[in-house]
Amino acid sequence: MKLRLMNLVSARRWVSTTLTLLFALLLAACGSGGMGGGAGCAPADLVEPDNSAPAPGEIVLDMNPLFVWGYTSCEPDNYQLQVTTYGGYEYGTTYTELTPLGGGLILNEVLDTALQPASQYEWRVAAIDSGVLGPYSYSTSFWTGPICATALLNAPQQETPENYAVVTNEFPPMGWNYPDGCIPEGTLLELDTDPNFPGPNLAHGFGGPRIGQIPLDALDDCTTYYWHVRSENPDGTGPLSPVRSFRTDFTGSCTPPPTCDTSALIAPFPGQPVSGEIVDDLMPNFNWFYPDDCDPQGYRIDVTTYGGYEFGTTFSGGTGNPSLVWALADALQPATQYEWRVAGINDTTLGPYSPSTAFWTGPLCTSATLLAPVQETPADGAVVDNEFPPLGWSYSGGCLPPITLLELDTDSSFPGPNLVAGFGGPRIGQIPLDALDDCTTYYWRVRGETATTPGAYSPTWSFTTNFSGGCAGGALGGASPTGLALRNLNCRAGDSQVFLETGFFGQDDVSPILGRNATGTWFLIPRGLGNTNCWVSAIYVELQGNASLDALPVLSSPPTPMPSPTAVPPVAATATSQPQGGSFNVTDILTHVDKTHVTAGACPERFTFTARITVDGPGTVQYRWLRSDQVAGPVETLSFNQAGTQSVFTTWDLGQKGQTYTDFWQRVEILSPNSLLSSRAIFSLTCQ
């Protein structure tokens, strides 16, 4: 261990004792001509040191933190420092170290043993003189980091009291822990006699990280209380934990609640599974609360496949007594959405049901098992008469993606804005944010994602609105026919492969077909850079609906270019080694931007782009990023040991006060071993 005089200029964190210690330092320097404290200590003169850092409740990010204290009454021989896991020096894991030197004033010590991350500790220190240990300082609790990212905050795990417990303490501690190897900057605890938590909060609600808390005042006897807890950071909150209840009975004299009058039955309050929860157990327990001073004779529980108790596959059962927990006798299906509800019952009279609560069964997909969702409704090419048509899909592969992205647009290249609330948890349907326009063709697609990997998109489907049947042509008069890309296609400046690629038409995407060349071998589509048109080979495009080749307008291609046409600055690509005995190609590129529509109070704003590059064998890929402002990034390389997919990333810091940036984008251009252009990752930004 190393003992040092505290450098006041570089002190890490100071609390109220700092001014006192600084004043003592100045007195010592003036009165004794040096940096020492008072005279040497007699054992009877030993007093408690003053703890300075880590301060109470502080979060330290260094697992070998600096401990700082002051001692101004005399100069002891040395000190004993103790650091323990929260709960007590006699019961926790305690580290005890002796400083090699003594002295007074402001002292600090670095613990030799690294602490555990995301843990609560206490520390104290005592002076030693002539072998006599003086009184310890006040024990100070602190936390080790790291601090959780707001987007990754999860509900704390409740520990005590157990759900439905009977407690005999007027100040029962409510305990929990943080499950993610990190801690939040704040925690909200709510305690109430109503499971809806209308208030007032009977606990000291919001505060720093902690693993337990007692009520503000003594609780009432023979009363049911409800509590839940959540993690918070300054820029956002995590989900609430499930609601738990306990009942007070301080002397054991509380009588059980009476049976409710049948005419007075009320709706129970659902507990778990909570709304949107993903349960791993296919035979889960269901629990609830009855927020009244009486109990029904029993409860009826219904569990149904999502969509309705009258139309879905429904499991029903009952408790036959006032128990608040029930389990299924039959296993649920994996990766399926269910609803459940509960009602009190007296004899054969059923009270009102609780709100119906939707949940999912697991398991969650991994990056390796993530498949494209299967679209169901509206059917591709359908005509809808509803301003808010539900878009429906299902998940395949027997697992659930943690995240689902749904996109709806009037442009099949999906430049935005997205007409639905795109990102969210697992779901099997969604309606648009606002009423759709009449006589308009819309395009939609959906994909699953994990926290690190976007999955494959479903095919792009279209539907046309016709609310009153009065749209020209039966639906949308004059609308261009559409075509489905049967493979990834480069889109070129003209109707020949000698033209430069100026756009991209991704496999399973649908695009309007603006026309064809005279021979019908190339189609013109609106997929070029900068919202321009470009040409794709007709052999790999399937016309949709009733569209026919003969009905397409014949358009003229630009003249055949001279050699080396350039739409963007050319890049000299060095030769890449090809695998022996076969070809090596990039077969697919998926691009994604982390946010698509941003209104920022302070600019510039950073956008992060991801491109997932897929190859069919081992080799080296040369690529570059292209931006909508015609800036081309440097040529970069990516090596593959075998066929597969890797991700590359780039960022763009953009924006000035008062400016709006609409449909800006980045994309990836593959230069070698083959030539390929990805779709655009489009975003918009408004700087206030």
Image (spheres, rainbow, N blue to C red):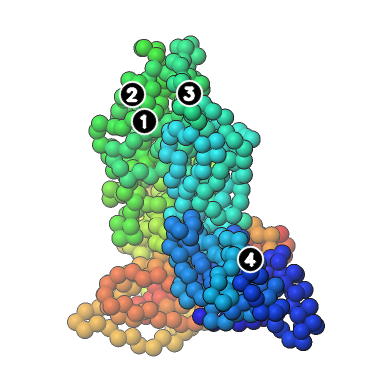
Marks 2 and 1 close (CB-CB < 8 Å): yes
CA–CA distance between discs 3 and 1?
22 Å
Q: Mark number for residue 319?
A: 2
Which residue is situated farthest in the right direction here? 30
Q: Which of the two discs, 4 and 2, sits closer to the camera? A: 4
The residue carrying mark 3 is 254
CA–CA distance between discs 1 and 4?
53 Å
The residue carrying mark 1 is 325
519 over 440 or under it: above or below: below
Q: Which of the two discs, 1 and 4, sits closer to the camera? A: 4
CA–CA distance between discs 2 and 1?
8 Å
- Amino acid at the residue labelled 2: Thr
CA–CA distance between discs 3 and 2?
24 Å
CA–CA distance between discs 4 and 3?
47 Å
> Residue 601 appears at what percent x and percent y?
69, 60
244 over 69 or under it: above or below: above
Name the N-terminal-most of marks 2 and 1: 2
The residue carrying mark 4 is 48
> Residue 385 appears at what percent x and percent y?
48, 34
